[in-house]
């Protein structure tokens, strides 16, 4: 791309010769001297630098724009060394393939540039561009690329405060507002580990809860402003592999509670890790999950049921497909406004479950309208799907999701093969407004089955040719023995 300039008008020598021949005649009718006439002609027509007619071969701007290069996250702006005729650019190797980049080049004369700017170039090596004026003058500029190693996106690995003075305890039933339950090692087989009904402001801190039977680790209802922090909750009588006897044995289960905060919590081997029903604006951070056991309809790390809003951020769930019995890894059911951020999901062996599922946002009993966000989450070993907005859900954005090691065959424990034929993104029976932005699917086992149906998404922005290093899982430490 070049700036438009006007062509210079150089003096014509033939015209000058005719003017000299005519001087005697001009002298008859004028008192102006020959010298004056010639001087006037030269002053008017001789090119000068001030009139801008001397061609300058110079690249004034070099950039690689995201609008011209599919998959480019941010514009790349070149730094020009005019004295050395060098252009320096930095390219993030994880941003996109460096083999198909089209630059935008601006020169300050009506000149041509070779290679043509519409031709993609391989910027893993130096590229030379030649600027040529209309009169044939040339100037060469060399683009010097620096390939920047990608910054590894990692979830923060956090060690929880460890207290060596935890006291052995049986199950706890809360009896007053603002009650504190802390520094306990609770074991129970005949009732819920901790139960709260109708009391607010309760704090559960630095506890290990081991439970079994047809019970829940922590169960609460109408318990506004509840805080659960620095806790490990495990169902201790799970079989070596496969589902629990029923789907009621959740690590944490809550109902009708606002302003819930759960942070630095590990959940393991429960039917579901955290199940919330009508719990609005909850905040869940630093959640570590392992081997959700179901059976159907449970098997999630987190399930929102008729909830308005809420944040799940900095989390991981690792499901061994020969041990766990999953459904959707994260389920947003009859709920809206949830933000799911900065996570790692590994392992789903359900023939019909997906990584993150929004569904039934406009059906009877749903709360909060429609919409939601899933951002900066990595998915490995998914079979039936990575992310979906279906059956009455809409306005869901899937941003910067990354998936690989997709499964096309047997999912594990003889549960069969994916019902969707290993689809990645689904949007069937949606209300619309969904978006896929800046996502990455690497080496899908079924590369022709990425999005269905495509018309359900307003934006389809993903790549399928870049490998990536997955996020690190959340690691919480509750073992004090090595500190004693």
Image (spheres, rainbow, N blue to C red):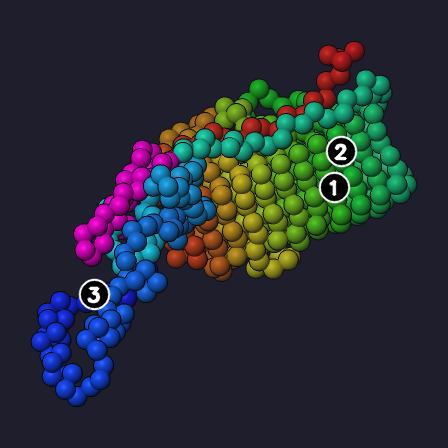
Q: Position of residue 329 (x, y in %)?
A: 55, 38
Residue span colored magenta: 117-145
Relative side of 25 to 377, left or right:
left
**Which residue carries the number 1 mark?**
261
**Front residue of this view, candidates 36 and 350:** 36
Residue 10's disc is: 3
Q: What residue lies at 62% left-to-right and 49% top-to-bottom? A: 338
Tell me the SS state at disc 1.
Answer: strand
Q: Nearer the viewer, mark 3 or mark 2?
A: 3
**Front residue of this view, candidates 170 and 393:** 393
Instruction: Residue at the far right: name it.
Output: 176
The answer to whether 423 is drawn above or below residue 206 in the figure is below
Tell me the SS state at disc 3.
Answer: loop
> Contact (CB < 8 A) between labels 2 and 1?
yes
Instruction: Residue at the far bottom: name it.
Output: 29
Q: Earlier in the sequence, mark 3 or mark 1?
A: 3
The answer to whether 61 is drawn above or below residue 329 in the figure is below
For the N terminus, the image quarter is: bottom left
> Contact (CB < 8 A) between labels 3 and 2?
no
**Which residue carries the number 2 mark?**
229
For the C terminus, the image quarter is: top right
Give me the C-alpha separation between circle 2 and circle 1. 8 Å
Q: What residue lies at 79% left-to-right and 27% top-to-bottom? A: 206
């Amino acid at each position: 791309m070049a700036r438009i300039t006007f062509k210079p008008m150089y003096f014509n020598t033939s015209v000058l010769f005719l003017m000299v021949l005519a001087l005697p005649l001009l002298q008859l009718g004028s008192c102006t001297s020959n010298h004056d006439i010639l001087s006037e002609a030269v002053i008017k027509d001789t090119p000068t630098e001030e009139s801008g007619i001397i061609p300058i071969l110079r690249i004034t701007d070099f950039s690689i724009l995201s609008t011209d290069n599919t998959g480019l996250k941010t514009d790349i702006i070149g730094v020009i060394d005019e004295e050395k005729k060098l252009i320096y650019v930095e390219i993030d190797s994880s941003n996109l393939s460096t083999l198909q980049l089209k630059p935008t080049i601006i020169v300050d004369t009506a000149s041509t540039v070779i290679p043509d700017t519409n031709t993609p170039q391989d910027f893993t090596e130096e590229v030379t561009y030649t600027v040529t004026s209309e009169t044939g003058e040339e100037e060469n500029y060399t683009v010097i690329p620096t390939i920047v190693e990608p910054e590894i996106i990692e979830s923060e690995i956090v060690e929880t405060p460890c207290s060596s003075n935890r006291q052995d305890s049986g199950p706890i039933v809360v009896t007053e507002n603002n009650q504190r339950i802390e520094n306990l090692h609770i074991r129970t087989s005949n009732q819920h580990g901790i139960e709260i009904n109708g009391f607010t402001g309760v704090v559960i801190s630095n506890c290990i809860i081991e439970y079994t039977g047809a019970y829940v680790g922590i169960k609460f209802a109408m318990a506004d402003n509840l805080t659960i922090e620095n806790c490990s909750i495990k169902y201790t009588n799970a079989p070596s592999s496969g589902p629990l006897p029923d789907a009621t044995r959740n690590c944490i289960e809550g109902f009708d509670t606002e302003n819930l905060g759960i942070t630095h919590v590990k959940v393991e081997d429960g039917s579901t890790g955290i199940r919330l029903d009508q719990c609005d604006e909850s905040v869940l951070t630093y959640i570590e999950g392992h081997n959700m056991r179901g059976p159907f309809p449970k098997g999630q790390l987190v399930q929102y049921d008729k909830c308005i809003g809420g944040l799940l951020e900095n989390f991981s769930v690792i499901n061994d497909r020969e041990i766990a019995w999953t459904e959707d890894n994260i389920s947003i059911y009859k709920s809206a406004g949830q933000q799911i951020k900065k996570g790692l999901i590994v392992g789903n062996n359900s023939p019909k479950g997906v990584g993150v599922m929004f569904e039934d946002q406009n059906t009877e009993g749903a709360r909060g309208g429609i919409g939601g966000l899933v951002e900066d989450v990595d998915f490995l070993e998914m079979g039936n799907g990575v992310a979906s907005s279906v059956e009455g859900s809409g306005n869901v954005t899937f941003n910067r999701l990354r998936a690989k090691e997709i499964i096309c065959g047997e999912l594990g424990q003889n549960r069969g093969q994916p019902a969707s034929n290993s689809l990645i993104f689904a949007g069937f029976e949606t209300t619309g407004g969904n978006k896929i932005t800046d996502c990455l699917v690497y080496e899908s086992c079924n590369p022709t089955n990425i999005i269905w149906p495509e018309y359900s998404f307003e934006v389809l922005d993903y790549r399928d040719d870049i490998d990536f290093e997955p996020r690190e899982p959340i690691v919480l430490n509750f073992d004090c023995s090595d500190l004693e």
